[in-house]
Image: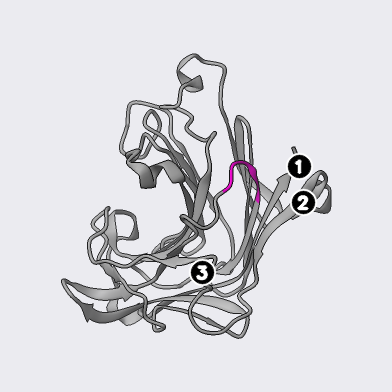
Amino acid sequence: MEENRLDGYTLVWEENFDCDGSPCEKDWSLEVGERWANNEQQAYTDSLNNVCVRDGKLYITARRETCGIRNYTSGRITTAGKHSWQYGYFEIRAKLPKGHGSWPAIWMMPDSSKRGNPWPHCGEIDIMEHIGRRENSIWFSLHSECHNHTRKDTKQYTTIREYENVCSEFHTYGMEWTDGAIEFFVDGESACVYRRTDDEEDRTESAWPFDQPFYLILNIAVGGGLGGEIHEEDLPYEMAVDYVRVYQKKG
């Protein structure tokens, strides 16, 4: 993050993955299960083979192994019920997996989604999505009831940018989230910005549900609607995360 962008911000939470083993229970929960949206093919587990902290980094690994009805296992961790934020600057430094069928994501969902507020009305913020078959492409998206990827009759808040070496080197994925605007960054450089307009529709919760607390999710999906065809020889897929930092302005 550029230093001048930090002006006025205070570091309110960080995770440097200092303790080996499972992610710290005070800060993270592991979501497990075999049935997920988007025709995804993985079962999420709490095994150290799928989610492990070692040598100062978090590793999420998707593997070819049977778990219940699924032939692949992976990891998904979340701060739901432990940490959530409304507005701020978020930085996650990560190295992404390589391989056809991988679908890693760094994203956020609102606390209200855990209380029965359904998707897409509740909203979703995708700080970073990547798919293995397009190795140099990064997706940045917002989803709401009025504007989401399932609708073709309205504007979409999705931008795709090209970057080199995202699977071989660490890069910093950032987001500045303020009242009425969300901007995404890679290595401190702006990738895109979405702004709430003054149109009457866009000032409704159905169009802009981003004025409420959201929690963070890190995961690798396997296959599915965006992940696409799985190449068995490319497994395992591994995402390494160096740190997570959250900054907010006082008051």
Q: Position of residue 192 (x, y in %)?
A: 60, 42
Q: Residue at x 83, y 46 (%)?
A: 7
Asked whether residue 132 appears in the rendered view, the answer is no
User: How crowded is the residue under tag 2: few (<14 C-alpha within 10 Å), some, or many (20+)?
Assistant: some
Q: Position of residue 116 (x, y in %)?
A: 32, 41
Q: Is residue 72 magenta?
A: no
Residue annotated with mark 3 = 96
Secondary structure character of the magenta stretch overall = loop
Earlier in the chain: of badge 3 and badge 2, it is: 2
- Is 8 on the left-hand or right-hand side of 77? right
Earlier in the chain: of badge 1 and badge 2, it is: 2
Q: Where are the magenta residues, as a range?
A: 85-89
What is the CA distance from the residue labelled 3 to the residue labelled 2? 28 Å
Q: Which mark is residue 10?
A: 2
Name the residue type under label 1: Lys
What is the CA distance from the residue labelled 1 to the residue labelled 2? 7 Å
Q: Residue at x 40, y 72 (%)?
A: 99
* Residue 70 vertical placement versus 92 (above, below): below
Q: Position of residue 105 (x, y in %)?
A: 46, 59
Location of the C terminus (image quadrant): top right
User: How crowded is the residue under tag 3: few (<14 C-alpha within 10 Å), some, or many (20+)?
Assistant: many
Q: Secondary structure at mark 3?
A: loop
Q: Which mark is residue 13?
A: none
What is the CA distance from the residue labelled 1 to the residue labelled 3? 33 Å
- Colour scheme of the rendered structure: one colour
Please say if the residues under marks 1 and 3 sit with CB atoms less than 8 Å apart: no
Q: Secondary structure at mark 2?
A: strand
Question: Which quadrant of the structure image shows residue 223?
Answer: bottom left
Asked whether residue 196 appears in the rendered view, the answer is yes
Residue annotated with mark 1 = 250
User: How crowded is the residue under tag 1: few (<14 C-alpha within 10 Å), some, or many (20+)?
Assistant: few
- In this view, the residue farthest toward the top is 200
